[in-house]
Image (cartoon, coloured by chain):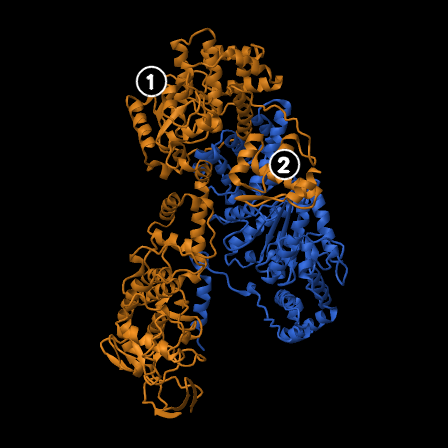
Chain colours: A blue, B orange
């Protein structure tokens, strides 16, 4: 571990994120603890995607077990393996299936977050398109034919797929816009690809295409995008969907079921190998899967496909199935994690600090006294407090850690998943916080 | 040494009697009292405006000061109120310290030297008008006003009634002493606070405040929004924009700053489109309070002053998120325009710039150039729907045209400008036509409002056929009237064109007939295609010809000519036509037309059953597929490029596994430590690569070889020269 070079940018990103209690977007490998088998399984998945296969995984874990962290870790591995990744949190306004534009909103968010190795922070859609066009240009130059023709030839594959024909048209439109210096046309093409056109008429007038990305074809477009990134010189597409518990929380059973139906479709396609070069990671809490009333298990076809391997109990594991369960951190895991954070923190010469393992133990025991087991089960606040303490120690070289630990304040955490969902209209979602206050103030005994 | 004890009378807020013993030693004082801190009664010390008091022989008119022996500061640890004038403290009348030499940073009447007290009292007695007065004295007076307005108003009605008076007084002081920046800033914020508290008007009836330079949301904005929510009045667009601009978490992209006026106009338009009158805000629980930093040390720290009983909407993130969406949309729409301005800073209002504006803004754009061209257009097209002109007439009216033959980009700009003014032009680069050249002809026509700005595949197919047909017709030297009529008829029956396209196709044909494409070049280019491609084209043309349901002998003649042109067997036309016409019939074939029979009974008409309209989706997909392939093939044929589209291959040594062009791009990056987005685009254009793709490629190569990225940033792109050196080594 100590040989790994940590880039200053990564170090800062990790420390910044941890301090504000969010999962870092880059450099997760430096603070990954354990989960060796799980990572290996996902690595195999990524290789399968790169070979033109398809996978789907449900990352199931309790609140605080590190689902989002794991998702981001896999995401950065995938980027390193030359995949393109897209990811988004599911919310009441962003679902896999909908009729009121929420599925298109999910697609737009996914495209907004599209990342490549060279652009890991998102916003890589234009880069991906231009990489494709660039390779087509090179070929056109070599063969001395028009780039239009090469683009069309290369996208021929896509044309057979649902929506593929217009997809190819839009890519061609991007090139034409570039070729004729028509920035507006280029921007329209990008807008179309992002799913930002809301009416077909607009799309037709702007680009001459007859279809748009809409609620009904989001999954088809993801499959198209997967094929497209492969044509652009990447190895495949990884789709990360976090906070799947929001599907579980949908009050309308019909809406919920049609989302599960889409998940079933994805599952079937991926397991049967119909989709090419695409992988899905769907992260959620156990109730999202196991609840037979509202969870994935409430949908019989999903239940039979996701049911646990009956032999994989009592410590035996089977990581080949679509469901991957993340155990909560143990105190030992947390100890190693704190060590790693300490290492990352001190990795930059200007931030040297000496803190022996004794201090880590003392810190943990302090936290355990303050908030009990929660300190390792839901370690977010523990880690925030730890990084803050490191910062204080660094800036005040005279201060001894044993003086400081007693003052560390670690608040207990609350699982926001238990909060009720706001009503379906956006108005209510916008003022959710104020509504909460209302509810509290009008409480009577 | 003097002992002084006092007993306070009862007031509403201070029901308990209290007393204190103050021991004064020299200037300092030691205080004993029966409570930890006895605040004293400000109401008793306050001198109202109409009263004149006399302190140490100075007659002070106009009041608005605290005079008394004891009054504690507002904050818990702030000691004696700094603005309190203690009449018993010694004053050195003989040497008044007018320069303020004995004054500290946070002056307090009790602590300053007696000479300074004399100067202070002198200033007060002079009616507080001496513009040369030392600013510390003004501040001591100002402290009193702050206290009265912020602290005393909580307890005393009388204080509340004095607020307008106090505001007026501060405004007067501002007129005298605003040359002192510190005083100006404190006093201005104090006036703002008073205004917000005093206003009886609904805040939103005035204009919203300009965006502040600090991170804080201006109070006036909070008050206005609070009123909007309370009245359930829709938020006007300027207020929405002001909110967005003041929101510390919103970062508006370059277009919002570079072309602020346009952005504002567009934002208001889009906002109205989406929310009509405006968003109706719902009151929330958080109340508006002003975060006020008093000048007076009396308060000890920042104070939160409640302003009215208004909900503080800026505590919510929901509404501003919705506004941000609109702003993002507007920025995207203005991107092209903004970049143009970035490249050509002085060209605001020029024709080219207007061409890049979003439709709504372009329609209302003004300026001499714009109006001159618009008037000319109106005149040119006034005598009929279409008007055929020499291209030079238009080009001379386009000031930025540099040569007789325009580039593609310039032609696109012209077409965009015309479209935004409601005119179409043929040839149009966007629809596959060649770029404009002064020796050519152009056709101007009026556009309907929903005219497309990009061709649909059927349109491309239709023009391809027209091209070939026109080429064939013209091959015998001239186009006969009959041929022209035939082409026009065919055009009308063309595949399902989208609204607006038939008009354009008509114009296109007319233009085509004036300047028929040369056959020679066509033959050569067609020869480049492979056999199966040529056959695809042939079959496609047959389908297009048969789109109207039947293929006339005249059409077959044309098709045969085209087949010969394509280098296909002329006989193949017949078999292809046959294949088309033997496609499975969907309706009964009429063998013999029914003859009306006499007599008999009329069979009652069958109940009209709505036949379900179904299409063979697979066939359509196949057809569209074919159209696209052909369109791409033919697009190349008719692109009359003056210069070869293919740039000569660069002789550059490949770097880090990149191809020649991208290696050249990488090398060019050495020139500067950082590049503007515009400059990168220019550089990429010069080399012949696409900017975003090139950046992604070189970054990828850098990650592969060095393990770090080379270019970072969106608007300004920073180059890591260390990485670059390693890459090039």
Res. B666 mark: 2
Query: Farthest front residue?
Result: B94
Residue B73 in picture, x, y percent from top left? 40, 79
Residue B153 x/y as whole percent: 32, 75
The relative height of residue B256 versus residue A430 in the rendered view (above or below) is above
Camera sees residue B161: no
Q: Nearer the viewer, residue B291 or A92?
A: B291
Residue A199 location in percent, x, y?
A: 44, 40
User: Considering the image in quadrants, where does the N terminus of chain B appear?
Assistant: bottom left
Q: In the picture, residue B5 is in which quadrant?
A: bottom left
Q: Is residue B455 above or below residue A116?
A: above
Mark 1 lies on a secondary structure that is: loop
Say whether residue B490 is left or right of residue A237: left
Q: Residue at x 43, y 30 (%)?
A: B413
The subunit letter for the residue under badge 1 reads: B
Residue placed farthest to the left in the image?
B50
> Which residue occupies 43% across, 68% down?
A438
Give the image quarter of residue B211: bottom left
Chain letter behind tag 2: B
Q: Is residue B532 above or below residue A38?
A: above
Q: Nearer the viewer, residue A95 or A390?
A: A390
Whether marks 1 and 2 lie on the same chain: yes
Give the class, few, some or many, for how many residues have Cα within 10 Å of label 1's Cα (few <14, many ≥20). Answer: few
Please give the residue where the numbered disc 1 appears in the rendered image: B598
In space, the residues marked 1 and 2 are separated at their CA atoms by 89 Å
């Amino acid at each position: 571990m100590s040989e790994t070079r940590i880039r200053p940018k990564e170090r800062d990103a990790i420390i910044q994120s941890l301090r504000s209690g969010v999962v870092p977007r880059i450099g997760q490998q430096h603070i990954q603890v354990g989960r060796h088998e799980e990572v290996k399984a996902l690595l195999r998945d990524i290789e399968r995607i790169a070979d033109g296969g398809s996978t789907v995984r449900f990352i199931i874990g309790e609140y605080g077990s590190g689902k989002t962290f794991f998702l981001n870790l896999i995401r950065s591995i995938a980027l390193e393996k030359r995949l393109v990744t897209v990811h988004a949190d599911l919310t009441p306004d962003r679902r896999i299936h909908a009729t009121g534009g929420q599925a298109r909103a999910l697609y737009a968010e996914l495209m907004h977050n599209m990342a490549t190795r060279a652009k890991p922070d998102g916003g890589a859609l234009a880069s991906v398109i231009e990489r494709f066009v660039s390779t087509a240009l090179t070929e056109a130059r070599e063969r001395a034919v028009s780039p239009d023709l090469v683009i069309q030839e290369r996208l021929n594959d896509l044309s057979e797929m649902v929506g593929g024909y217009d997809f190819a048209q839009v890519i061609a439109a991007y090139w034409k816009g570039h070729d004729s210096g028509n920035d507006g046309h280029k921007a329209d093409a990008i807008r179309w690809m992002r799913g930002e056109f809301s009416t077909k008429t607009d799309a037709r007038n702007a680009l001459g295409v007859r279809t748009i990305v809409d609620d009904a074809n989001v999954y088809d477009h993801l499959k198209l995008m997967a094929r497209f990134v492969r044509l652009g010189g990447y190895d495949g597409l990884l789709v990360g969907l976090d906070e799947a518990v929001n599907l579980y929380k949908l009050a309308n059973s019909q809406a919920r079921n049609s989302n599960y139906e889409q998940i079933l479709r994805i599952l079937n396609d991926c397991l049967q190998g119909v989709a090419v070069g695409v992988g899905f990671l769907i992260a959620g809490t156990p109730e999202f899967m196991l609840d037979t009333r509202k969870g994935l298990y409430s949908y019989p076809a999903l239940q039979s496909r996701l049911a646990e391997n009956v032999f994989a109990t009592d410590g035996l594991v089977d990581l080949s199935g679509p469901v991957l369960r993340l155990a909560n951190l143990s105190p030992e895991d947390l100890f190693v994690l704190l060590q790693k954070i300490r290492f990352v923190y001190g990795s930059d010469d200007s931030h040297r600090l000496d803190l022996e393992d004794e201090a880590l133990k003392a810190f943990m025991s302090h936290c355990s006294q303050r908030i009990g087991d929660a300190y390792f089960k839901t370690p977010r606040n523990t880690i925030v407090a730890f990084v803050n303490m490191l910062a204080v120690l660094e800036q005040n070289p005279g201060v001894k850690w044993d003086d400081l630990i007693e003052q560390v304040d670690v608040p207990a955490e609350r699982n926001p998943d238990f909060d009720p969902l706001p009503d379906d209209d956006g108005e209510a979602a916008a003022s959710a916080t104020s509504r909460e206050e209302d509810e509290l103030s009008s409480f009577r005994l | 040494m003097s002992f002084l004890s006092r007993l306070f009378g009862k007031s509403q807020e201070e029901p308990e009697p209290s007393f204190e013993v103050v021991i004064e030693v020299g200037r300092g004082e030691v205080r004993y009292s029966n409570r930890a801190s006895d605040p004293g009664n400000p109401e008793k010390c306050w001198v109202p405006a109409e009263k004149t008091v006399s302190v140490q022989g100075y007659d002070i008119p106009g009041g608005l000061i605290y005079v008394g022996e004891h009054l504690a500061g507002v904050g818990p640890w702030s000691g004696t109120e700094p603005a309190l004038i203690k009449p018993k403290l010694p004053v050195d009348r003989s040497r008044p310290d007018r320069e303020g030499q004995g004054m500290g940073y946070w002056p307090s009447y009790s602590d300053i030297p007696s000479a300074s007290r004399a100067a202070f009292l002198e200033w007060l007695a002079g009616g507080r008008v001496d513009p040369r007065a030392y600013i510390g004295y003004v501040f001591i007076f100002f402290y009193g006003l702050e206290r009265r307005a912020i602290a005393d108003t909580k307890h005393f009605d009388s204080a509340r009634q004095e607020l307008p008076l106090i505001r007026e007084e501060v405004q007067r002081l501002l007129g005298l002493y605003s040359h002192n920046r510190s005083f100006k800033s404190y006093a201005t914020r104090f006036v703002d606070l008073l205004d917000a508290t005093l206003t009886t008007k609904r805040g939103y009836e005035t204009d919203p405040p300009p965006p502040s330079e600090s991170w804080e949301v201006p109070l006036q904005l909070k008050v206005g929004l609070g009123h909007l929510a309370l009245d359930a009045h829709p938020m006007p667009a300027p207020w929405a924009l002001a909110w967005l601009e003041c929101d510390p978490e919103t970062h508006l992209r370059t277009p919002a700053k570079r072309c602020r006026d346009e952005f504002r106009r567009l934002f208001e338009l889009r906002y109205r489109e989406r929310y009509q009158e405006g968003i109706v805000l719902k009151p929330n629980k958080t109340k508006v309070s002003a975060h006020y930093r008093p000048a007076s040390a009396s308060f000890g720290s920042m104070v939160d002053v409640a302003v009215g009983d208004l909900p503080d909407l800026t505590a919510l993130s929901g509404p501003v998120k919705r506004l941000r969406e609109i702003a993002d949309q507007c920025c995207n729409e203005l991107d092209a325009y903004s970049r143009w301005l970035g490249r050509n800073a002085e060209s605001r209002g020029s024709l080219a710039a207007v061409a890049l504006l979003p439709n709504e803004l372009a329609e209302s754009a003004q300026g001499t150039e714009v109006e001159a061209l618009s008037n000319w257009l109106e005149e040119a097209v006034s005598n009929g729907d279409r008007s055929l002109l020499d291209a030079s007439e238009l080009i001379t009216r386009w000031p930025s045209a540099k040569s007789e033959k325009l580039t593609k980009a310039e032609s696109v700009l012209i077409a965009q400008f015309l479209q935004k003014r409601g005119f179409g032009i043929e040839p149009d680069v966007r629809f596959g036509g060649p770029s404009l050249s002064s020796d050519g002809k152009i056709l101007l026509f009026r556009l309907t409002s929903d005219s497309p700005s990009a061709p649909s595949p059927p349109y491309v197919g239709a023009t391809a056929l027209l091209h070939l047909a026109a080429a064939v017709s013209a091959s015998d030297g001239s186009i006969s009237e009959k041929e022209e009529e035939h082409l026009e008829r065919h055009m009308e029956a063309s595949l399902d064109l989208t609204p607006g396209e038939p008009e354009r196709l008509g114009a296109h044909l007319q233009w085509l007939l004036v300047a028929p494409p040369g056959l020679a070049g066509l033959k050569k280019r067609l020869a480049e295609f492979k056999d199966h491609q040529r056959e695809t084209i042939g079959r496609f043309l047959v389908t297009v010809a048969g789109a109207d349901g039947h293929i006339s002998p005249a059409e077959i003649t044309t098709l045969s000519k085209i087949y010969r042109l394509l280098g296909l067997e002329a006989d193949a036309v017949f078999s292809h036509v046959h294949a088309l016409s033997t496609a499975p019939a969907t309706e009964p074939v009429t063998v013999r037309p029914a003859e009306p029979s006499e007599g008999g009974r009329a069979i009652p008409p069958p109940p009209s059953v709505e036949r379900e309209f179904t299409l063979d989706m697979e066939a359509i997909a196949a057809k569209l597929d074919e159209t696209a392939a052909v369109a791409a093939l033919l697009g190349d044929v008719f692109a009359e490029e003056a210069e070869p589209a293919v740039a000569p291959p660069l002789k550059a040594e490949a770097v880090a596994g990149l191809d020649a062009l991208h290696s050249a791009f990488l090398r060019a990056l050495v020139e500067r430590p950082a590049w503007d987005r515009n400059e990168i685009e220019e550089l990429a254009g010069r080399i012949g690569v696409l900017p975003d793709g090139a950046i992604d490629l070189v970054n990828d190569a850098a990650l592969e070889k060095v393990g770090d990225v080379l270019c970072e940033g969106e608007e300004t792109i920073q180059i890591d020269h260390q990485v670059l050196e390693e890459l090039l080594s």
